[in-house]
Structure formats: C-alpha cells, structure tokens
Image: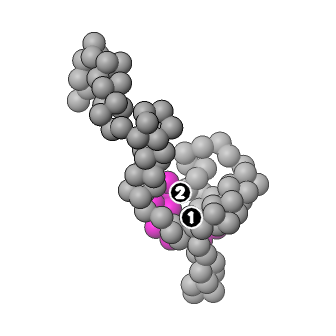
Amino acid sequence: MAALWRRGPLSFVDLIDEVRRGSAWGDATIKTLLNRLMRKGAVRSEREDGRQRYHPVISREDYIAGEVGALLDRLFDGRPDALVEHLRARHADRPASR
C-alpha cells in the first residue's frame, strides 16, 4: 500500500520495483500480498494504455484512522485519553526529537 500511496497508480512491474526498494520481498510474496489487498477491496486494477495498473482504494489517512480506532478499542476501551496518558507515561523521560 505504501508504494501505491507514494507513487499513485502503478503497473505490476513498477509496483514490484517500488516495493523492492524498501524490502527484500520476492515477486511471489508481493503478488500474494497484492492479491489479498485486491480481495479485501483495498486495491483495484484497471486496464490503462494496454497495461494493468493498480490503484489504492483506501487513502493512507483513512487506513491510519481505522488502525488507530481498532487500537483504541482493543487496548484502551475506545478512550483516546487513555492512549495519550499511556504515551505520556512511557515517553516522559525521553528528550523531544527534532
């Protein structure tokens, strides 16, 4: 997903190249993940200029919102203030990074 969010719609070859820049995954792993993302409706493919191109269906922002919501529900009873307090307590003695 990160490759599609970064670069927009990509052909399969371009998608593999982009994913390989950031990981050591092989072609089969990338293809398996792409198929799973398509089955889940997170990625769609369209024929453009005679080639299949893959598009993200969900935005990065919507994905993050969903994951944070699931984290809040699972670990903090849906309470954002409990997550903030946890982060404050865990990182209180760390210097701020710039």
Q: Is residue 3 above or below residue 78?
A: below
Residue type (three-letter) at the residue carrying disc 2: Met
Can residue 13 be seen here? Answer: no
Would residue 8 be visible to someone looking at this image? yes
Q: Which label belongs to residue 50?
A: none
Q: Quadrant of the C terminus?
A: top left
Q: Of discs 2 and 1, which sits in the foreground?
A: 1
- The colouring scheme, among rainbow, by chain, secondary structure or one colour, is one colour
Q: Residues within 10 Å of mark 2 (few under 14, many from 20)?
A: many
- Quick check: 79 left or right of 56? left
Determine which of the numbered discs, if any, sits on residue 42 in the image: 1
**For the residues bearing labels 2 and 1, Cβ distance under 8 angstroms:** yes
Residue that carries the numbered disc 2 in the rendered image: 1
Asked whether 31 or 93 is in front, the reply is: 93
Q: Is residue 9 magenta?
A: yes
Earlier in the chain: of badge 2 and badge 1, it is 2
| Residue at the limit of the structure toward the front, as seen here | 77
SS for callout 1: loop
- The span picked out in magenta is 1-14
Residue 27 percent across, percent down from the top left: 72, 55
Q: Position of residue 18 (x, y in %)?
A: 55, 56
The outermost residue toward the top is: 93
